[in-house]
Amino acid sequence: MQQELAGRIPLVVVGFSPAEALAPLADHLGLTGAVLSDTDRRLYRRLGLRRAPVWRVYSPGTLARYAIWKLRGRTLHRPVEDTRQMGGDALLVDGRVERLWRPATPDDRAAPGLVARSARARGHIETG
């Protein structure tokens, strides 16, 4: 994973897990930029980010997949994270939100290219 989006935009990842849980995740994902912990979810609330409804995360298809895994002897573990947290992506300039993407589903995240094009269109990174 890139530390800088499009080579010029510093990437900051904010999670709601404790820092000691985020550090191994950052290593696993190859993140070299800032990885911050927001255990109280203050940033999530300020940005108006939300949790998905139970039916969207645990759809009939997901529950069927879990049932098949269980029948095949796979051990299912309780999630250690909030599986309903939707997350979001934001373009910030000087501490001010320039553009915010709130996902419609848990896996509907802004593509890095979209964020880079948005920054470029606002004159925050050079074209070319």
Image (cartoon, rainbow, N blue to C red):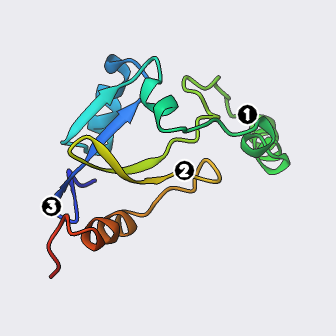
Mark count: 3
Q: Which of marks 1 and 2 is nearer the N terminus?
A: 1
Residue in view at x 43 percent, y 22 percent: 17
Q: Residues within 10 Å of mark 3 (few under 14, many from 20)?
A: few
Q: Residues within 10 Å of mark 1 (few under 14, many from 20)?
A: few
Residue 4 location (% of width, % of height): 19, 55
Question: From this viewpoint, is residue 61 visible?
Answer: yes
Q: Can you tell which quarter of the image residue 118 is in?
A: bottom left
Foreground of the two, 99 or 8: 99
Task: Tell me the quarter of the image containing the C terminus.
Answer: bottom left
Question: From this viewpoint, is residue 16 visible?
Answer: no
Foreground of the two, 7 or 20: 7
Amino acid at the residue labelled 3: Arg
Taking the image as shown, residue 81 lies to the left or right of residue 5, namely: right
Q: Earlier in the sequence, mark 3 or mark 1?
A: 3
Residue 73, labelled with which disc?
Answer: 1
Q: Which of marks 3 and 2 is nearer the N terminus?
A: 3
Q: Residues within 10 Å of mark 2 (few under 14, many from 20)?
A: some
Q: Can you tell which quarter of the image residue 86 is in?
A: top right
Foreground of the two, 91 or 20: 91
Residue in view at x 37 percent, y 21 percent: 21
Distance of mark 1 from mark 2, alpha carbons?
37 Å
Amino acid at the residue labelled 1: Gly
Q: Which of marks 1 and 2 is in front?
A: 2
Q: Which residue is identified by label 2?
A: 102
Residue 127 location (% of width, % of height): 17, 79
- Above or below 62: residue 124: below
Contact flag, marks 3 and 2 (Cβ < 8 Å): no
Q: Which residue is identified by label 3?
A: 8
